Image: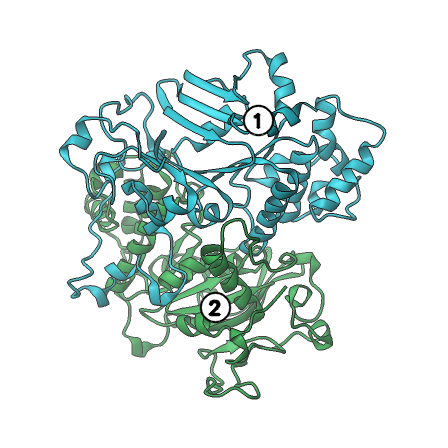
Amino acid sequence: MQTVAVRHQDDVPVIAFESVTKRYHGVTALDQVSLTLPPGLTLGLVGESGSGKTTCIRLALGLERPTAGRVMFGGQPYPRSRRQLRPLRRQFGFVLQDPYDSLDPRRTLRDIVSEPLRVHGMRSPDTDSRIADMLAAVGLRDAPLGSYPSRYSGGGLQRIAIARALITDPAVLICDEPTSSLDVSVQAQIINLLLEARRNRGLSVLFVSHDLDLIGRVADTLVVMYRGRVVESGPAHLVRSQPRHPYTRSLHDAVPADDPARRRLVAGTGAARRDDPDHPPNPRRVTPADDPACEPAGRAPATDSCVFADRCPAVQDRCRTQRPPTVTDADGRTHACFFPLA
Amino acid sequence: MSAAAPPAAAAPPAAAGPALRVTGLTVAYGGLPAVDNVSLQVRHGQVVVLIGETSSGKSSLALAVARLLPAAAAVGGLVEIAGTDLAALGAKQARRQRASLVGYIAQDAMAALNPVLPVGRQLAEMFTVHAGVSRAAAAERAVGELARVRIDRPRQVARAYPHQLSGGMRQRVMIAMAMALSPPLLIADEPTTALDVSTQAEILALVGGLQAETGAGVLWITHDMGVVAELADWVAVMYAGRLVEQGPVQEVFDHPLHPYTEGLLRTRRDLRAGRPGEPLYQIAGSPPGLTARQGGCGFAPRCSRRTGVCDTTAPDLRPAEAAAGSSGGPSPRSDTAGRLAACHHPLSDDSAKTAVTV
């Protein structure tokens, strides 16, 4: 099978973005983004709305082409023509955020899960048993193949989506917030399913999430994005525990506490804390310019400044007038900041 | 419109009773119970966080308390906001009084805001309609309210339409509208669920600060234990339409009584502290939909402590009792403001440390 060649070329990244820029109608969604997914590993993409992570997914799936730079698969640039893209797409499975949106409610389980086989001409007399095996593997052992999505909960639907993603035995799994729409008590089940599938199949995984804790459990390496740029990258546990970029640190600080005794988001503004010199009230005021999600169309991209300058607590003049280059440290980690955290 | 009413009074003193008292609330859709006999209180100046997942009934409860459910939803029980039962008033009077009694912050600001009016106008309407203030004065007050929710250029934002603002900005507008008439009770129905974590942090800090300033009672609905940890004085846990546990937040975190509460806490702690690549702690099964409920305890199908009685008899919400062999357990109290759990086999103070394995 074609996928074997991709899996065992250990030196060649499965997916690579080489200084990829993507613009839509004057709005820059990605600005010189570089990242690599080595075979058998999981690359986590962390970012909030407006970060460009969804655009990365679309480019990785070959749904769009970059405005500048190159997107590589298995060391080769993505083909330009649809016809050439198709065999490539067989090597990708994807699981998206909203299971209610991504599965056609009018189609049966059999149709949904077998669709990739149909598209890639991979159907055979044993397709039904293949589907049944796959459903069993995702925890839906006795699910009737003729049943419809309406019968299943959010977690059940994501299991079906995972079955569909894996049915062609892809080399790469792309997950875009696969559990964000699910109940907390169900999220772990789905993540465990993905971890198991990854282990059993030697998958390379591109995992997008806004949840720093979750991505820390799932990813080997982490790329942190803000407003279309990569601000930091490196081994997941290091980027989380010793962030070098102020944005990464602010993301970390924004995560709610897991115990009331360690709360820190609200304490600083409570009346009880008013007189406490160690906890001055949070003075931050927001303007429309602050929110990356509401970038007005036509506004020129900030090419000559750091993209986080407006919100950075450690901002200095240089940050507003020059774009910080991406620096690769001796340990292989990268950051784009003139004044990285120690 | 009748003659101008005076501006709403600030939150009444604590002696006047709780900001919210819910007694035996039931909500049913087409005969299916979404909220099943729930009682709880929010005192003035207190933040009660109600945590639950899909089909727990938490949103139906919030809407029922604010009297925002359509007539088709059968609502029973008693809801008193600062002593007033809105359901006992005529529709017109209820509408007039509601805005100054309870501020409601919805999850989806785009759905709650009028898309064809600038947000400043919508905010000003709170004052012209409910406080009898002139349009000019109301417009000024609206700008002031936007500044109060930490919007830096309030005049500019006041002229904007909802779609021109980011999600976080819209939520600030919603908070401004909810608090405009200084109601004694705020209901926040998952207002940060759809927001980025950075924005959520700011909104939590904002509401926490404003609440401390005004002394309003807050009922905050969430599915996120982190929000409970950050915001709550008191936590109430809902599952399959019922209240299954409640108590002071630190006590519930340290010594959860209900296996579901313990499962939620453990899930979260494991996510943060567990080793990369290792399987996550998980609760088996998934929350039951409205039609899937049978007799007995709603959580039984997923519970590792389940016995025969759990399948046949729904446990009552009871004051926490010290289980056999434990020491220093909470003393039983019979008022609904106490530490309560609905479980035939609650985790005792001792066994709360033992893992609930699934």
In the displayed structure, B345 sits above or below A128; it is below
Of residues A39 and B336, the one nearer the viewer is A39
Are labels 2 and 1 assigned to the same chain? no
Q: Residue A141: x, y in percent? A: 76, 48
Q: Residue at x 18, y 62 (%)?
A: A278
Q: Which mark is residue A143?
A: none
Residue for badge 2: B236
Q: Quadrant of the C terminus of chain A?
A: top left
Query: Is A239 placed left or right of A311 in the picture?
Result: right
**Chain in cyan (letter):** A
Residue for badge 1: A9
Q: Quadrant of residue A84?
A: top right
Q: Residue A62: x, y in percent? A: 54, 21
In the displayed structure, B345 sits above or below B183; it is below
Q: Residue B90: x, y in percent? A: 45, 62
Question: Element type at marker 1?
Answer: loop
Looking at the picture, which amino acid does disc 2 mark?
Ala
How many callouts does the rendering have?
Answer: 2
In the displayed structure, A257 sits above or below A53; it is below
Chain B tint as drawn: green
Of residues A6 and B188, the one nearer the viewer is A6
Looking at the picture, which amino acid does disc 1 mark?
Gln
